[in-house]
């Protein structure tokens, strides 16, 4: 039996979940913690980017397995 | 030591990751029908998965933290470990060596030696390799326990037990495939965790130009030329002119040739990932796919170290300082975690530390899966029980995981009590590894090389390494584990230079003795060498594959890119 677990699915899901977690914390959390990161809300920005990339990987994986 | 306090959100990030890791093992369990599935993924990995795992298996946390520490200590010259000491060897193994590893259908690197040479050569390699994997995995556990205890205040023993159990769970369930999948996750986590650190750090110090200016002052205050930390080759005419203490010839031959080819082309830990690829083309492309991100990694791991050095020397403006050792010199070991703590607020801090923990665990998992295969096929099946059912070997492979992890935990505890034993073992393994590439080079490209020649060469190379180490000493070190225990006939500017030259002597001795003994012993029969030696193996057919997917042109393009990077940071 070939190993047909498409790694792109867990990979995309992991980054979508982590991105969501960080972005949500970035939106809700206390803004004073961002003095460390030069005033940038890195959780929101980077979390958002990870969320979008994770979803993109998931979308590509779904298209690939549908064929 | 500065403590880092974690918030619930950081623990949530770590928790999500750990849940995924174990879930992958659970999901792969149903594919584990034969020992081949468990120990070699049934040769089913796509090239990109095998390629990223090939890279990641080497990206243990000691590597990541060590390279950042070297970045702080030596500056951009640390890139030699990538652009000189990795990329060319990765291209070589993919283009020239993989046809024999993969094409011979050997299940491990020691098994290739058995097919090409003889039983004793395989035995020597299999036993030293198995011992070395347990040792490295134990050291990895020990380093992680130490980091978590000193940085986060976690309990040392509990940290070791927890991570050993997680690694045990996912390998026991999903075997090599589980380790490989998790290595790919870890690769992306490292990129996701470190990229924002580099962007924030570079912004803070005023970009590359700002960093060059700041490190120029540091270099001149230490008596080096202003570019000593930001130019990689220009100051290597003499070992005294650069912080690394190496000269260009030792660097190019010792690191760029002997050490790097010895590691990337013969170490089963990485080669196993390519052997798990689903076809010959995929196997040959595996190291090439790995070489591209490898080339870019200096920007992720060396730059934070260089930025840390600049911040430490800014007269206190940033509030960041690398800690001091007892003798008053800078302690570089914790550069990465301290930089994460300096720039990262809660949330993304959890991501950065999770990336670090992931590399500890997958560094350990890589060693354990390589150990499983060598133990099951090269030791158990060869010397203990050779005629059992495949079910039996699957069972042996599974339980080798339990044994391997228990032994790693044991090694970690030995390291806490007897640090000098570990230093000594590391030295012995370095001696054994140094000559290996000569054996493989002759084995693959000279059909006259014999089993007696190979074995004698390996022994001679190992002894030559030990002898050179015993007769030389780095500047201002005392005779002992650093060398000089036979008496000091050569002094090197740094330990690194001494290591490079030890490797050069070992390789040369192995090469000459293998050739010499091969000539006076009976030649191997040619029909037994088909598929194992270059001149007796038909060229693999790349016909129909577009040129940009063929290993040859791809490898050439990668070499050109590495040359451009070297030239840019010259």
Image: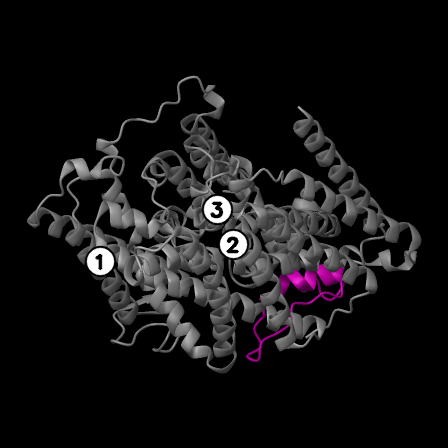
Subunit under mark 2: B
Pointer 3 or 1: first along the chain: 3
Q: Are marks 2 and 1 in contact (CB under 8 Å)?
A: no
Residue B501 appears in view: no
Q: Residue furthest top?
A: B544
Q: Which-is-in-front pick, marks 2 and 1?
A: 1
Looking at the rendering, the stretch of residues picked out in magenta corresponds to B313-342
Q: Are marks 2 and 3 on the same chain?
A: yes
Q: Are marks 2 and 1 on the same chain?
A: yes
Q: Main secondary structure of the magenta part?
A: loop
Q: For this view, does B466 lie left or right of residue B48?
A: left
Pointer 2 or 1: first along the chain: 1
Tell me the distance, in whole angstroms, between the alpha carbons under discs 2 and 3. Answer: 56 Å
Q: Tag 2, which secondary structure? A: loop
Q: In which quadrant is the N terminus of chain B drawn?
A: bottom right
Q: Tag 3, which secondary structure? A: helix
Q: What numbered label is drawn on residue B37?
A: 3
Q: Is residue B45 magenta?
A: no
Question: Dot 3: within a 10 Å radius of its alpha carbon, few (fewer than 14), some, or many (20 or more) residues?
Answer: many
Q: What numbered label is drawn on residue B225?
A: 2
**Residue at figure coordinates x 26%, y 65% from the top left:** B468
């Amino acid at each position: 039996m070939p190993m047909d677990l498409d790694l792109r699915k867990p990979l995309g899901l992991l980054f979508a979940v982590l991105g969501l977690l960080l972005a949500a914390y970035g939106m809700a959390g206390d803004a004073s913690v961002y003095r460390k990161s030069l005033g940038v809300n890195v959780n929101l920005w980077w979390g958002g980017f990870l969320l979008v990339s994770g979803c993109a990987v998931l979308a590509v994986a779904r298209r690939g397995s549908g064929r | 030591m500065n403590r880092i306090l974690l918030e619930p959100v950081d623990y949530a990030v770590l928790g999500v990751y750990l849940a995924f890791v174990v879930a992958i093992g659970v999901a792969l369990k149903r594919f584990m029908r034969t020992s081949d599935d468990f120990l070699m993924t049934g040769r089913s990995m796509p090239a990109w998965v095998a390629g990223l795992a090939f890279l990641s298996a080497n990206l243990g946390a000691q590597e990541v933290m060590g390279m950042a520490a070297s970045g702080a200590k030596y500056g951009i010259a640390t890139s030699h470990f990538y652009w000189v000491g990795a990329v060319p060897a990765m291209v070589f193994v993919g283009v020239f060596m993989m046809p024999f590893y993969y094409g011979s259908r050997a299940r491990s690197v020691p098994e290739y030696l058995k097919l090409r040479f003889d039983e004793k050569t395989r035995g020597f390699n299999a036993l030293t390799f198995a011992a070395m994997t347990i040792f490295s995995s134990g050291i990895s556990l020990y380093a992680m326990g130490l980091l978590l205890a000193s940085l986060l205040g976690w309990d040392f023993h509990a940290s070791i037990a927890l991570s050993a159990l997680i690694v045990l769970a996912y390998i026991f369930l999903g075997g090599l495939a589980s380790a490989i999948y998790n290595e790919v996750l870890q690769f992306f986590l490292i990129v996701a965790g470190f990229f924002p650190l580099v962007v924030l750090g570079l912004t803070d110090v005023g970009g590359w130009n700002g960093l060059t200016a700041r490190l120029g002052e540091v270099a001149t205050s230490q008596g080096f030329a202003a570019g000593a930390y930001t130019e990689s080759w220009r100051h290597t005419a003499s070992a005294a002119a650069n912080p690394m203490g190496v000269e260009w010839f030792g660097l190019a031959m010792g690191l760029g040739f002997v050490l790097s080819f010895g590691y990337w082309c013969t170490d089963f830990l990485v080669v196993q990932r390519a052997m798990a690829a689903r076809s010959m083309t995929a196997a040959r492309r595996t190291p090439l796919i790995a070489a591209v991100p490898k080339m870019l990694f200096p920007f992720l791991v060396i730059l934070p170290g260089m930025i840390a050095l600049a911040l430490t020397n800014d007269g206190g403006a940033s509030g960041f300082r690398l800690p001091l050792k007892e003798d008053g010199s800078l302690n570089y070991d914790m550069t990465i975690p301290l930089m994460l703590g300096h720039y990262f607020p809660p949330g993304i801090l959890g991501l950065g530390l999770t990336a670090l923990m992931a590399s500890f665990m997958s560094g350990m998992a890589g060693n354990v899966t390589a150990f499983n295969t060598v133990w099951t096929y090269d030791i158990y099946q060869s010397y203990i029980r050779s005629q059992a059912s495949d079910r039996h070997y699957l069972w042996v492979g599974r339980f080798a995981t339990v044994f391997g992890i228990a032994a790693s935990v044991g090694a970690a505890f030995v390291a806490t009590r007897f640090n000098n034993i570990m230093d000594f073992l590391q030295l012995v393994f370095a001696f054994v590894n140094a000559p290996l590439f000569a054996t493989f080079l002759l084995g693959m490209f000279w059909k006259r090389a014999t089993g007696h020649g190979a074995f004698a060469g390996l022994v001679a190379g190992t002894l030559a390494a030990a002898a050179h180490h015993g007769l030389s000493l780095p500047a201002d070190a005392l005779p002992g584990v650093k060398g000089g225990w036979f008496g000091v006939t050569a002094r090197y500017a740094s330990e690194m230079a001494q290591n490079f030259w030890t490797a050069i002597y070992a390789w040369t001795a192995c090469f000459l003795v293998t050739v010499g003994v091969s000539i006076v012993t009976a030649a191997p029969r040619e029909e037994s060498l088909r598929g194992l030696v270059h001149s007796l193996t038909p060229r693999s057919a790349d016909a129909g594959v577009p040129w940009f997917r063929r290993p040859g042109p791809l490898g050439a393009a990668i070499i050109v890119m590495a040359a451009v990077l070297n030239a840019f940071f010259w």
